[in-house]
Image: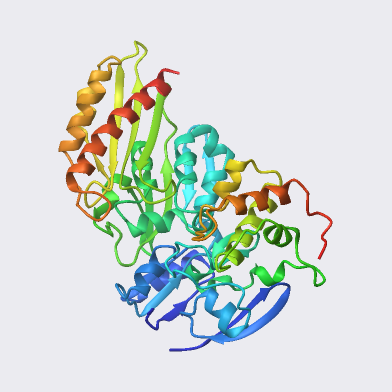
Amino acid sequence: MEKKLLRLTVNNQEYEVFINPKALLVEVIRDYIGLTGTKRGCDTVSCGACTVIIDGMSVKSCSVLAMQAEGARITTIEGLEVNGKLAPIQKAFIDHGSYQCGFCAPGMIMSAQALLNENPSPTEWEIKEGIEGNICRCTGYNSIVRAIDATAKGKYTEVKS
Amino acid sequence: MINDFIYLKPGTLKEALAICAKYDDCKVICGGQSLLIVMRQGMIAPEYLLDIKHIKELDYIKFDKKEGLRIGATTTHRAIEKSNVIKKNYPVLASMENKLASIQVRNWGTIGGNLAHADPAGDPAPVLIALKADIKVGSTKGDRTMPLEDFFVDYFETALNKDELVLEVKVPVPEPKTGAAYQKFNLLESDMGVVAVAASVTLNGNGKCKDARIVLGNAGSTPRRVKRAEELLIEKAYNEGLFAEAGKIASEDCEPVADIHASEEHRRHLLGVLTKRMLKKAWEQARG
């Protein structure tokens, strides 16, 4: 097996890693770069806990070879905060109690952020469609939908922390 | 565990085809949304992995009023779902894509990869076959085009030769007075279908059926047309009893398997009901 040099940009920071080309993007983000906010859940493209944003699109990082992300701009949950302050969607999740065990939250928030980037004022149904790829086993989803709705309605544009 | 492989990332289609011709134990990855799962399960362990995800030559949606629609193999499901030209001219294709897996999968998975994977439960194939699509494949020796229904050979097996890649899907312009509908049965809306049915109906000037296609998904080893039921409809007028009869034929002319999601009998029943409903929907659309 020949290791490959991979250059990728995560949260506006450039990284160079030497990896086995079979490494998944989630492995490179967590184990090589050390950003452990992105969670590894089902590993079968089902649960969405590993969701990151690649070039503006939400993608499940357990099902992308890291080599395929070469040159792409990747955003993880750690990349959402601005100047040490939580992003509006993160603040909304806290205010609405949108997680209990917390394992789905990073992926859920990345899906929500991708949705809001694409569609700044989604309907409740569009919000539900936007997080269809993310499984939460605690909340029953309602508090998550409320948090995304509140963010979309601009209740968190002035971020307080 | 995924096996160790030699990773090949050619810059152009020409280089990719040369690699296909050169290496025997070579598997092609595009979006990898299906492939990486079966590799992780150890079901396939190729020596070489050829990555074509980034080959932009194959990433396009083109529409011409005479030639119809052409979709390049590395076009993502999301691009098809959101394409205005597809929404306008082939709404059934866009709405099918909208229910294909989750947004994340649609953002990265590709139409060529989906078809080449040849999962009998795949969503695009029945719809594309109902729309009379062709598939273009190519190797260093040249291209060939075949009806999409002939592309599927068996469970996860296609007519692709070892040295060939899927290049393009072509969908003709629908005839006037044509309607098409697709529905899968599942418990979660964006899940894979327990079974699925796509139907298209073209009407004559007198309102009778000129042509029809009924395609079943996950009802056997490949997507399959119910030709006996299609023939039944020709030159007939709108009649719900007729659709029920076609549904009965569909539930007979299939070979669904039993698994954790549904028994064989349940699947046959569902195929009959969905065939009836999809014919009605397609017909009403065709009537306008």
Judged left or right of residue A96, residue A156 is right
Numbered marks: total = 0
Judged left or right of residue B59, residue B233 is left
Q: Residue at x 35, y 51 (%)?
A: B122
Residue B130 image position (x, y, % from top left):
34, 37
Judged left or right of residue A73, residue A81 is right
Q: Residue at x 67, y 59 (%)?
A: A93
Residue B205 image position (x, y, % from top left):
37, 12
- Residue B249 drawn above or below residue B127: above
- Residue B258 drawn above or below residue A41: above
In this picture the colour scheme is rainbow
Judged left or right of residue A161, residue B45 is left
Foreground residue among A112 and A25: A112
Q: Residue at x 60, y 78 (%)?
A: A36
Residue B46 image position (x, y, % from top left):
34, 77
Foreground residue among A132 and B281: A132
Q: Can residue B21 be seen?
A: no
